[in-house]
Image (cartoon, helix red, strand yellow):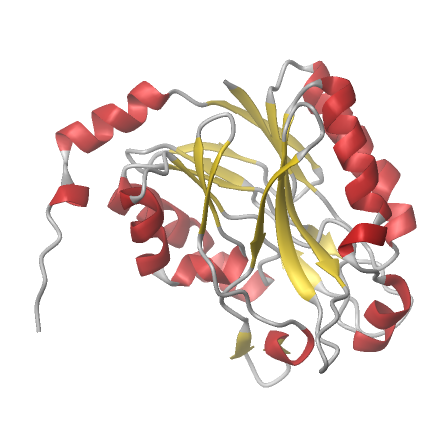
């Protein structure tokens, strides 16, 4: 199936972001893509918890989700909304970072809440405490869409056991929508994506946020870009560079079967102490 990865430069205003996102999705669908993927936090990229509390809403009220479901149905495509930042009813007020797989009829086929929180000090001036604003998920998700999909988000990519379990459960394609930092992106992004593909004989589809993100409040975030599609043999099939846009790849389940036949590592795991 022809598949499109949308690379965005979302700001911290979901209302302004939505028409831009929809235009790129429409372009991808118009080019013949039957499966389209958007990046992490498609609706709102922000480093300000105050701003997030102002503009985010619960899932059932989110206009980005509503509009993109309608667009998927109108254009009859599978759509992975890489993730939306959403309010929850948690007592501590933390948000959800939630990925949605939307069917060509506009239904929500699967939801996945990001499991691993990006709590790191990249440098003396660049620190992240994602768990302060977002509550982690606790469930791996395998979904049937254009193919068998293992859903993950961004920092999850550093935890290979998650991908192993998804692949052994039947995933042929692993999704990694992201908003990677520029420092860790330059050092690790391609290597991590290719490793997850090679280890599991899977396609890896990683649509990403890119550039400096406009911010009404707080410090503007900068993300690495380079949305990538990786083949099940570990080859880079497409790289979006650093400009917003769309890249395309054809998914062929036969390639997954061939890679796993050549190196059947998924059947070779052993228990050890």
Give the percent coordinates (x, y) of residue 55. Answer: 88, 63
Using the image, determine if residue 258 lies above or below residue 194: above
Using the image, determine if residue 142 lies above or below residue 256: below
Q: Relative to residue 161, is residue 183 drawn left or right? A: right
Using the image, determine if residue 88 lies above or below residue 239: below
Give the percent coordinates (x, y) of residue 171. Answer: 37, 38
Q: Quadrant of residue 261?
A: top left
Q: Quadrant of residue 162?
A: bottom left
Q: Relative to residue 72, is residue 205 drawn left or right? A: left
Give the percent coordinates (x, y) of residue 273. Answer: 8, 74
Residue at 72% across, 81% down: 91
Residue at 34% across, 34% down: 235
The answer to whether any part of residue 240 appears in the image is yes
Residue at 37% across, 62% down: 159
Total marks drawn?
0
Q: Quadrant of residue 174?
A: top left
Instruction: Say which of 154 and 66 sits in front.
Output: 66
Give the percent coordinates (x, y) of residue 179. Answer: 62, 56
Instruction: Say which of 243 and 67 sits in front.
Output: 67
Instruction: Say which of 205 and 62 sits in front.
Output: 62
Residue at 72% across, 49% down: 42
The answer to whether any part of residue 127 appears in the image is no
Q: Relative to residue 44, is residue 269 drawn left or right? A: left
């Amino acid at each position: 199936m022809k598949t499109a990865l949308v690379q965005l430069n979302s700001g911290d205003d979901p209302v302004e972001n939505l028409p831009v996102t929809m235009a790129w999705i429409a372009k991808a669908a118009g080019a013949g893509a039957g499966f389209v993927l958007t990046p992490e936090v498609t609706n709102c990229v922000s480093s300000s918890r105050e701003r997030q509390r102002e503009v985010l809403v619960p899932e059932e009220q989110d206009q980005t989700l509503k509009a993109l479901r309608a667009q998927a149905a109108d254009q009859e495509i599978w759509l992975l909304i890489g993730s939306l930042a959403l309010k929850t009813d948690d007592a501590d007020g933390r948000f959800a970072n939630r990925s949605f797989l939307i069917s060509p009829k506009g239904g929500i086929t699967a939801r996945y809440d990001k499991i691993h929180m990006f709590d790191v000090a990249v440098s003396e001036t660049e620190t992240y405490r994602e768990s302060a604003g977002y509550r982690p998920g606790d469930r791996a998700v395998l979904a049937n869409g254009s193919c068998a999909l293992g859903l993950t988000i961004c920092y999850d990519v550093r935890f290979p056991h998650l991908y192993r379990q998804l692949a052994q459960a039947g995933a042929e394609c692993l999704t990694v929508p992201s908003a990677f930092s520029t420092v860790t992106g330059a050092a690790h992004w391609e290597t991590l994506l290719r490793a997850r593909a090679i280890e599991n004989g899977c396609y890896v589809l990683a649509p990403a946020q890119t550039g400096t993100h406009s911010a009404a409040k707080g410090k503007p975030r900068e993300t690495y870009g380079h949305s990538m599609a990786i083949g099940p043999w570990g080859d880079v099939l497409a790289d979006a560079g650093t400009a917003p846009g769309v890249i395309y790849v054809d998914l062929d389940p036969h390639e997954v079967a061939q890679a796993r036949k050549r190196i059947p590592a998924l059947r070779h795991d052993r228990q050890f102490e």
